[in-house]
Amino acid sequence: MMNRQSIFPRNTWNIQSLVLVHISIGIIILSWIIPGTRYIWDYIDQKCFTFLHHWIKTSIFWQNFWAIANHKRIDWLHDIFMGSFFLYYIKKGGMELRARRFAELLVSMLCFFSIICLINKTFIPAYFSISRYSPSLLYEDAIRLSTKINWLYVKDHSRTCFPADHGTTAVLFIRTVFFLMGRRTGIIALIYGIIFCLPRLVVGAHYVSDILVGSASIALLGLAWLYSTPAMFYLINLFENTIYKCTRALNRKLNV
């Protein structure tokens, strides 16, 4: 039978962690909603946008560079690079742990798609639709690359930029890598997550708070209900048992 060692907790509740995450996220969201503290976020958004957006005002080269960085095919390369982290994690475990780690990867990917597709793209637009224009639409001195670059489609604006899908993906990726692979690999994932989100910030598709408030809150809240409850344990066991049974059935057919 396969080694069932796993970094995930057994079928127990981590109430302290769950409560702490909810309180922290609640404070962050309230600070963004309440007028008395919202001006702090607005100030951070304005300063970050001005600093980053100045990059594309310097030359035609940088305009083309950031236009390419925002293209969908570059997102595919990002997906491949993120996947390489998890493939490294599976391979590093050795034969006895690969089935378990592959199950952990499958469950993590399922969580990724569930949070992004069900919460970001379905639940929030239906019940908590926030009409927030991208800075590229609001700032008079902003350069809209979509009007400057004719040979490439550039997504540089939205009328509902909160929360940021790229930001949610980045936070999910970073938190999962930290949890699965430890601090050292997690720091590399953190640096890469910033690089992943940077093009959207530079062209003015999103504010920083779209990521730090909206994306981070959704991703961390969703992951808290998986990592701090028995849900992840049961799902991983289910996937691992399925993988184990399929592997045994395949080996029997090959040996016949």
Image: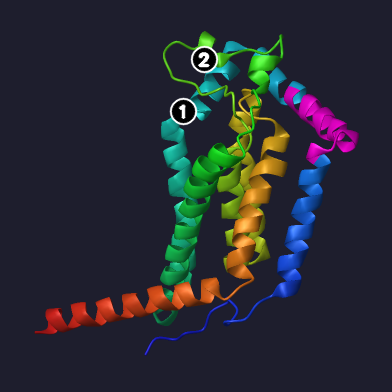
Q: Position of residue 26 (x, y in %)?
A: 77, 52
Determine the secondary structure under disc 1.
loop
When the figure is inspected, residue 180 is found, relative to residue 252, above or below; the finding is: above
Can residue 185 be seen in the rendering of this structure? no
- State left or right for residue 107 relative to residue 129: left
Splitting the image into 4 quarters, where does residue 151 fall? top left
The amino acid sitting under disc 1 is His
Determine the secondary structure under disc 2.
helix
Give 29 or 64, whichever is nearer the viewer: 29
When the figure is inspected, residue 216 is found, relative to residue 133, above or below; the finding is: below
Q: Single out the residue that lies furthest toward the bottom.
A: 1
- State left or right for residue 10 relative to residue 92: right
Rate crowding at label 1 as few (under 14), some (14 to 19) or many (20 or more) other CA atoms within 10 Å. Answer: some
The amino acid sitting under disc 2 is Ser
Residue tagged by mark 1?
A: 71
Q: Residue at x 48, y 71 (%)?
A: 92
Q: Position of residue 155 (x, y in %)?
A: 51, 24
When the figure is inspected, residue 173 is found, relative to residue 136, above or below; the finding is: below
Splitting the image into 4 quarters, where does residue 243 fall? bottom left
Q: Is residue 33 magenta?
A: yes
Q: Is residue 25 magenta?
A: no
Q: Single out the residue that lies furthest toward the front.
A: 127
Q: Position of residue 250 (x, y in %)?
A: 19, 77
Q: Quadrant of the C terminus?
A: bottom left
Mark 1 or mark 2: whose residue is earlier in sequence: 1
Residues in magenta?
Answer: 32-49
Residue tagged by mark 2?
A: 146
Can residue 107 be seen in the rendering of this structure? yes
Q: Position of residue 106 (x, y in %)?
A: 42, 64
Q: Residue at x 75, y 53 (%)?
A: 25
How would you classify the magenta stretch by its main secondary structure?
A: helix
